[in-house]
Image: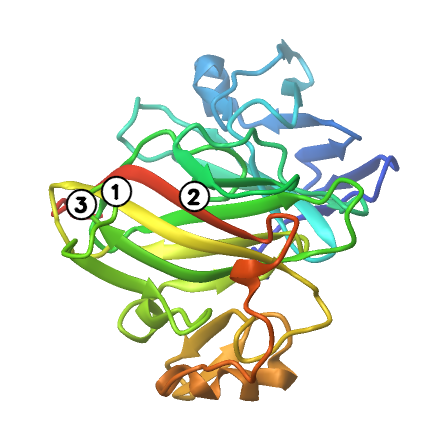
Amino acid sequence: MKYLWLGFFVFAIATTFVVSEDSNGDIQITCEERSVHIKWKVDKPMTENPSRLFLGSCFPSHFSNESDGAEADFYYPLSACDFRRMATWKYLVYENKLTYRPLPKPSPPSFSYPVRCVYDRPKGWTPTFQSSSTGVIQGHGELAFHMEILNYDFSGPAESNVFPLGSFVPVWAGVDQQAHQPLLLLLEECVASTTVEMYPDTLTYPLINNKGCLVDSKKSFSKFLPRYHSSSIMLNLQAFRFAVGQEVYIHCKLIAWDPDLLNEEKKACNYNKTTGEWELLDDPFQSSLCQCCESSCQGRGKRDTDSAPQGLVLKSVLGPLTFTEDSL
């Protein structure tokens, strides 16, 4: 994933504290290990109402108005003030804004300034949220599987299960490897239905089929996202019209697999609308494994993982979710 803001940004690596100033020297930002310290020399019109100065949702920690000018100080942990956390392959990124709002919301701020702290991502880092209370896992063996609907930036559990049509439903699944050999988590099949139990006559809407082909990506902007770790997988699923206004459940078959043994039956494939071709999530150079997504991805006489030991195959149910006609 690539996140790039135009304008001001600050890079901080590991525990090294970095101080940066804007071109006028009015804003000084220090990215510390788990917090940020900002000194903002505010213009005179802003001094009349310092309570309208914000770092995200936070007021200044300290405000002084001396003869040589006024200054607002913000000193907060990165877990506060509605900092937005994202992750790339190499970095953890924390973003926010300094704003001056002379009028309450929904009036826009008269001044806005981006704040960005970037840290080397610790080796083996994965999102620190708890296992889902909305996912029902059925399986066997000793591996611990989790599946959950998250918030928009995959930093924690979703705050609502209601999604307007066209919005994205962030889906995360993971397996705790414990002392097991490294594992690759795959979503072999996912369908949506209006029932928590599946029956032969249950009406379904296909999302992933054909052994890991995200078929919904052909008709929407649904997409597998780059991995944090081989033992987890993330999916941005675009809210669809199936059963609008009703309770919807997402049924998935999860497989924990050997990362070095990708094949036509064990894969995760996105459809690229620009090229009109299927692409392998984990190694685009092996995208030929996805060509069968247009036909049938059959095995080659190898043992089916349904009979494999140690709980490599799991079934999960997420929901209920509700998709609405509300505009974004």
Q: Which residue is mark 2?
A: 152
The image shows residue 30 at horizontal and vertical percentages of: 76, 32
Q: Which residue is mark 1?
A: 197
| Residue at mark 3 to residue at mark 2: CA–CA distance | 24 Å
* Left or right of 227 on screen, residue 111: left
Rendered residue at 56%/28% (across/down): 130
Rendered residue at 36%/63% (across/down): 222
Rendered residue at 65%/28% (across/down): 78
The image shows residue 23 at horizontal and vertical percentages of: 68, 47
Q: Nearer the viewer, mark 1 or mark 3?
A: 1
Q: Secondary structure at mark 3?
A: loop
Q: Residues within 10 Å of mark 2 (few under 14, many from 20)?
A: some
* Left or right of 288 on screen, residue 177: right
Quadrant housing residue 92: top right
Q: Earlier in the sequence, mark 3 or mark 2?
A: 2
* Depth order, front residue of 23/177: 177
| Residue at mark 1 to residue at mark 2: CA–CA distance | 28 Å
The image shows residue 1 at horizontal and vertical percentages of: 58, 60
The image shows residue 216 at horizontal and vertical percentages of: 31, 68
Q: Which residue is mark 3?
A: 194
Kind of residue at disc 2: Tyr
Kind of residue at disc 3: Thr
Q: Are marks 1 and 2 in contact (CB under 8 Å)?
A: no
Q: Residues within 10 Å of mark 1 (few under 14, many from 20)?
A: few
Q: Nearer the viewer, mark 3 or mark 2?
A: 3
Q: Residues within 10 Å of mark 3 (few under 14, many from 20)?
A: many
* Depth order, front residue of 153/225: 225
